[in-house]
Image (tube, helix red, strand yellow):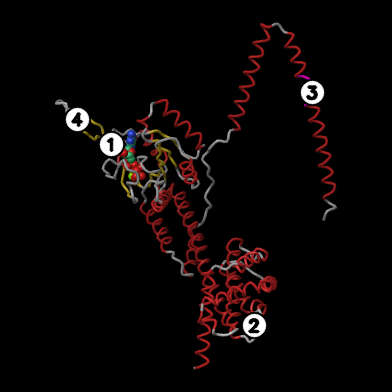
């Protein structure tokens, strides 16, 4: 395999040598010109020399600045497209999970809600953003009859609420007020808000300042779903015109066309202040600020103009992508649960098998029917196809590993017997039974971990994991195996008596 690589390396070396010679020539030439230039400049009269040097320095600074502007790592809003999943694909995944007794009710409910909203035919707009940015105040301004809770404290809105608002052109919108994100201990509410944002046709991302890293990430996430997105910079009343213009410019640059529009608004909210009465007393009053949201209304009119039917495919794709992602996570959880059950089942069988055998050998158990069945069942759970040959090769390899570590495993099992006084009196077979139980438990866990992470029967990876698990089994594992052995021994004795 090494001979075809040789000429390629030679060509590469030759190219490198030519390149180096060229670079050297360039450097010498450049140095030469600089020296020549310096000499000429120093021969010039002072009145010409000084301005020329100043000009040259200014030019250098300008070039440096330009390079910095171009090469500066911009904290742009990142976003790719969410993976598309079809309705039938999602349904078949959910069906498969239901058959495996996974908790699929929430996923099914999401699909029912998807259909319910499509049949309703309303254009739906969700407000989304961090706590206290003014989402609920904005709902009030967009739907004056609505009465969502507004408060200076963050985390006021705790669940999703829908309100009907009307655009100046007469069309109705269903507006969703959602809990704010970035609340301490507010993970569940943040998920509720995210789910609702995906269920809407268009999203208004509300912020009250320049975007933080977390906010930029949220916008990146939203933009992956390709539905109309407006960024509303609220509380513009707190800035002067120049500041608002600068803020809009910065956000537009960072979002790089991921948002269909970036607008500055003042949703209103209320303000508290103290006033002095005629008799000199001071009084605290609260009054509603007058909202100023025209640019947002215009953007919403434009973005929702295509109507519910035209906006439906992007909405459906977003919901399906999220249900798909959650069904994948549920599939991983289900596989982990089934794996644990399977490993427990085979560990028990290994213990019983070892107790029944007259002179059990680790190889016989591991490379026998029990080991094969364990590998096959775990591979099936993780959807990894395996060949008979691979299973045999793997078990032979693991048999060697186990034989090399038998002394350690027996020592560990011996210690376990001391901790369980009942076990010690049951005879020598018991020690081996606990040892085999530990071996099977370790094999099963190693197999399940490799299959889950690599989706293949990677023998080297499995072996490494088995070594680690056998060398220092956790106390909880040892006790469980010892208890299994005890139960199996009692059952055996009872059967022998009966
Ligand atoms: N200065 C100013 N304050 C505003 C504006 N809009 C809202 N506020 C204030 O911002 C605070 C939060 O307003 P909310 O509407 O409750 O904010 P929210 O985003 O719904 O908050 P959560 O539901 O907790 O996430 C309140 O004190 C409002 O009075 C605005 O346009 N200008
Ligand atoms: Mg709110």
**Quadrant of ligand 1 in image:** top left
Determine which of the numbered discs, if any, sits on residue 29 in the image: 3
Residue 168 horizontal side relative to residue 339, left or right: left
Q: Nearer the viewer, mark 4 or mark 3?
A: 4
Mark 4 vs mark 1, CA separation in Å: 19 Å
Q: Height in image: 231 above or below 282?
A: below
Q: Earlier in the sequence, mark 2 or mark 3?
A: 3
| Residues tagged 2 and 3 counted as in contact (Cβ below 8 A) | no
Determine which of the numbered discs, if any, sits on residue 282 in the image: 4
Q: Earlier in the sequence, mark 1 or mark 2?
A: 1
Q: Residue at x 58, y 33 (%)?
A: 72
Q: Height in image: 378 above or below 354?
A: above
Mark 1 vs mark 3, CA separation in Å: 71 Å
Residue linked to disc 1: 270
Q: Nearer the viewer, mark 1 or mark 2?
A: 2
Q: Which residues are magenta?
A: 27-33
Which element type, helix, strand or loop, lies under badge 2? loop
Q: Earlier in the sequence, mark 2 or mark 4?
A: 4
Residue linked to disc 2: 360
Q: Decide if residue 21 is in sight here.
A: yes
């Amino acid at each position: 395999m090494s001979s075809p690589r040789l000429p390629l390396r030679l060509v590469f070396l030759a190219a490198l040598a030519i390149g180096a010679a060229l670079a050297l020539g360039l450097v010498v030439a450049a140095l030469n010109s600089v020296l020549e230039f310096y000499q000429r400049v120093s021969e010039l009269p002072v009145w010409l020399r000084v301005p020329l040097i100043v000009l040259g320095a200014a030019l250098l600074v300008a070039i440096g600045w330009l390079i910095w502007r171009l090469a500066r790592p911009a904290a742009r809003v990142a976003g790719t497209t969410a993976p598309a999943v079809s309705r039938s694909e999602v349904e078949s995944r959910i069906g498969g999970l239901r058959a495996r007794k996974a908790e699929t009710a929430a996923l099914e409910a999401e699909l029912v809600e998807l259909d319910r909203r499509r049949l309703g035919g309303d254009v739906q707009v969700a407000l989304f953003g961090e706590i206290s940015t003014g989402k609920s105040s904005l709902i009030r301004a967009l739907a004056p009859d609505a009465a969502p809770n507004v408060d200076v404290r963050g985390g006021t809105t705790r669940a999703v609420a829908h309100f009907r608002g009307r655009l100046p052109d007469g069309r109705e919108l269903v507006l969703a007020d959602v809990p704010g994100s970035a609340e301490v201990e507010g993970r569940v509410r943040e998920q509720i808000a995210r789910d609702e944002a995906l269920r809407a046709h268009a999203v208004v991302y509300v912020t009250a300042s320049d975007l933080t890293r977390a906010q930029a990430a949220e916008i990146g996430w939203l933009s992956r779903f390709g539905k109309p997105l407006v960024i509303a910079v609220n509380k513009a009343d707190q800035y002067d015109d120049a500041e608002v213009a600068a803020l809009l410019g910065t956000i537009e640059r960072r979002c790089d066309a991921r948002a269909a529009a970036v607008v500055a608004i003042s949703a209103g909210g209320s303000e508290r202040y103290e006033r002095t009465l005629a008799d000199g007393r001071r009084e605290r009053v609260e009054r509603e600020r007058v909202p100023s949201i025209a640019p947002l209304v215009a953007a919403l009119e434009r973005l929702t103009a295509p109507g519910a039917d035209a906006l439906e495919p992007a909405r459906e794709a977003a919901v399906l992508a999220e249900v798909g992602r959650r069904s994948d996570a549920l599939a991983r959880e289900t596989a982990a649960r089934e794996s644990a059950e399977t490993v427990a089942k085979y560990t028990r069988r290994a213990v019983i098998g070892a107790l029944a055998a007259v002179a059990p050998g680790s190889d016989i158990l591991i490379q026998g029917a029990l080991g094969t069945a364990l590998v096959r069942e775990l591979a099936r759970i993780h959807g990894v196809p395996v060949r008979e040959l691979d299973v045999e090769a793997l078990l032979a390899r693991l048999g060697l590993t186990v034989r090399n570590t038998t002394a350690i495993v027996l020592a560990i099992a011996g210690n376990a017997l001391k901790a369980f006084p009942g076990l010690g009196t049951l005879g020598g077979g018991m020690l081996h039974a606990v040892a085999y139980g530990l071996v099977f438990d370790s094999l099963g866990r190693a197999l399940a971990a490799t299959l889950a992470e690599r989706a293949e029967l990677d023998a080297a990876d499995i072996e490494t994991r088995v070594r680690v698990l056998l060398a220092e089994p956790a106390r909880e594992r040892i006790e469980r195996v010892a208890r299994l052995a005890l139960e199996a021994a009692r059952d055996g004795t009872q059967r022998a008596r009966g």
